[in-house]
Image: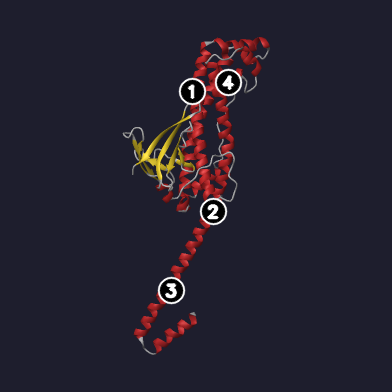
Amino acid sequence: MITLFRKIRQKFLSQSKLSKYLFYAIGEIVLVVIGILIAVQLNTANQQNTNRKHVESILKSVFVNLESDMSNPILRYIGFCEFKDSLNNLVLNNALDYADYEAGGEGRRGLSRLMNYEFEPFQFEDQAYERLMASIEIIPDEYMPIVNMLQDVYSKEVPVVNEVAMEVKAFVDEIDDKYQTTYDWYSNTDPSHFRQRVEYMLNDPKHLNDVRRHLEIINHLLEHLTTLKSNVAIAYSKIHSQLMHDEPFSELIERFYFPDEGALKEYAGIYKGVDNRDVKFEFLSREYYLALASSGSALKFINTNTDRFMLPSDTEGNYIEFVRNENGEITGLNIFRVGQNGEASSTAYKKTE
């Protein structure tokens, strides 16, 4: 091909056809430029495909890490905090006697160890997430919602959880130091000293003060662990729906759904109370959730089931369920609030716009 072009150039020059030569030269330059552009596009496409595969590989690792973090520490310590919370309330309500402490013994989960058990900060599997953040410049736009969800997990809630966990550890260490330096029964396990320990826990007002503080810290940790649990479930569900839909969904994790833009807009609108029309609010559709117009993006209502949405941070289990008519059109919603007895009451709203 190059030889052919050279012969054509030489022919035009030998025949002194300058205008034709210039026309040819311009055409040759255009062809070269087009060839370069095509090569650049092919190289860009290949690089984008390589980047996509790299990012997807990392996201799949994150997917595995999320399930691991859900199992331990999140679910493990939620159970631990709920256990401690129930013990704290028993103590504060004077619902225990010596026999209860005796039955529990000196073990880690025993009542006599309520205040000075061993507690260590949490270890999360965030290596894959760190690799993802290091590759932020090459992440395709379609995966940026997942990145935002993972940031809610590892950059926002995980640091808070660990901060509160350190508060728990500091408090437990403080109580342990107080026991060690103040009471003879700390280092003795014979029946006589065990009874002294229990007598202190049953009757000393200082112990009740410590239990009250312990209850507040544990509940604070439980609140953030529950929020983290929901954030992990959202990110896990999103990765599963986009990349891992052929894989089994973990039995440990609550499933969330992500309607497309058209389906999500169906829920948007203004709703007024059926019993009190002065009460109204407006839902707006966002990228993958519903938001109240008055709160911007502060509150994210995520789809958990058919026509059902909830706030991931709602530890009480309250939710919103939209109502459809016989034609499948959304005509209203019910807000379900769960009471202390576990029963849900509802308030009806009618869609007006």
Q: Disc 1 and disc 3: Cα gap in Å? A: 73 Å
Dot label at residue 32: 3
Q: Nearer the viewer, residue 57 or 224?
A: 224
Residue assigned mark 1: 216
Residue placed at 55% from the left, 43% from the top?
Answer: 127
Q: Nearer the viewer, residue 124 or 1?
A: 124
Instruction: Determine the residue located farthest toward the front in the rendered image.
Output: 326
- In x, y percent, where is residue 324? 43, 44
- Is 280 placed left or right of 122 in the picture? left
What SS does tag 2 mark? helix
- Is 40 placed left or right of 276 in the picture? right
Specify which label sits upstream in the sequence, 1 or 2: 2
Residue assigned mark 4: 116
Identified by mark 1, the residue type is Glu
- In x, y percent, where is residue 163? 49, 31
Identified by mark 3, the residue type is Val
